[in-house]
Amino acid sequence: MLCTTRIAYGLRLAKLCYDPEMARVGMHDAKTNLSRLVERAEAGEDVVIQRNGKPVVRLVPVVEEPRSLASVRGAWRGRVHMADDFDELPEDIAEAFGAR
């Protein structure tokens, strides 16, 4: 039973490493056709670049998550401290701005 489990695991692992449907191109072809390969990867196709017949690099699109204010909320927590008298305007500064 343990042997068949290891074989099944090995087959699943091999499938992850080798997919016959992915585009495999040599290094020279990749340099020549990089723009086209990037377009194919952006379209969702798996593109693998090989060196001497061995897979070296996989092109995948960068998926950027939309940045919002919520994504940075709390980023400065613990780094910035407000003085206790922050809301109090000193007299000399108030006079310089004509506030008094």
Image (tube, rainbow, N blue to C red):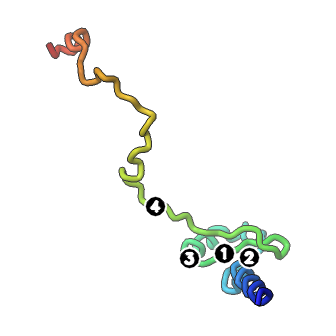
Answer with mark 3 or mark 2, whichever residue precedes in sequence: 2
| Callout 4 amino acid | Glu
Residue 60 occupies quadrant: bottom right
Neighbour tally class for label 4: few under 14, some 14-19, many 20 plus, Cα within 10 Å: few
- In 3D space, how far apart are the residues under numbered discs 3 and 2 (Cα atoms)? 16 Å
Foreground tag (3 vs 2): 3
Locate the N terminus by quadrant. bottom right
Foreground tag (4 vs 3): 4
Residue 45 as seen in the image, left or right of residue 77: right
Query: What residue sits right under mark 4 in the picture?
Result: 65
| Callout 2 amino acid | Val
Q: Tell me residue 14's x, y (percent).
A: 74, 82
Q: Compared to 78, does 66 lie above or below?
A: below
Query: What residue sits right under mark 2 in the picture?
Result: 25
Query: What residue sits right under mark 3 in the picture?
Result: 44
The number of numbered badges drawn on the structure is 4
Q: Tell me residue 23's x, y (percent).
A: 68, 80
- Seen as rendered, the residue at the extreme front is 1
Neighbour tally class for label 2: few under 14, some 14-19, many 20 plus, Cα within 10 Å: some
Query: What residue sits right under mark 1 in the picture?
Result: 47
Q: Are marks 4 and 3 in contact (CB under 8 Å)?
A: no
Answer with mark 4 or mark 2, whichever residue precedes in sequence: 2
Q: Secondary structure at mark 4?
A: loop
Q: Tell me residue 61's x, y (percent).
A: 57, 67
| Callout 1 amino acid | Val
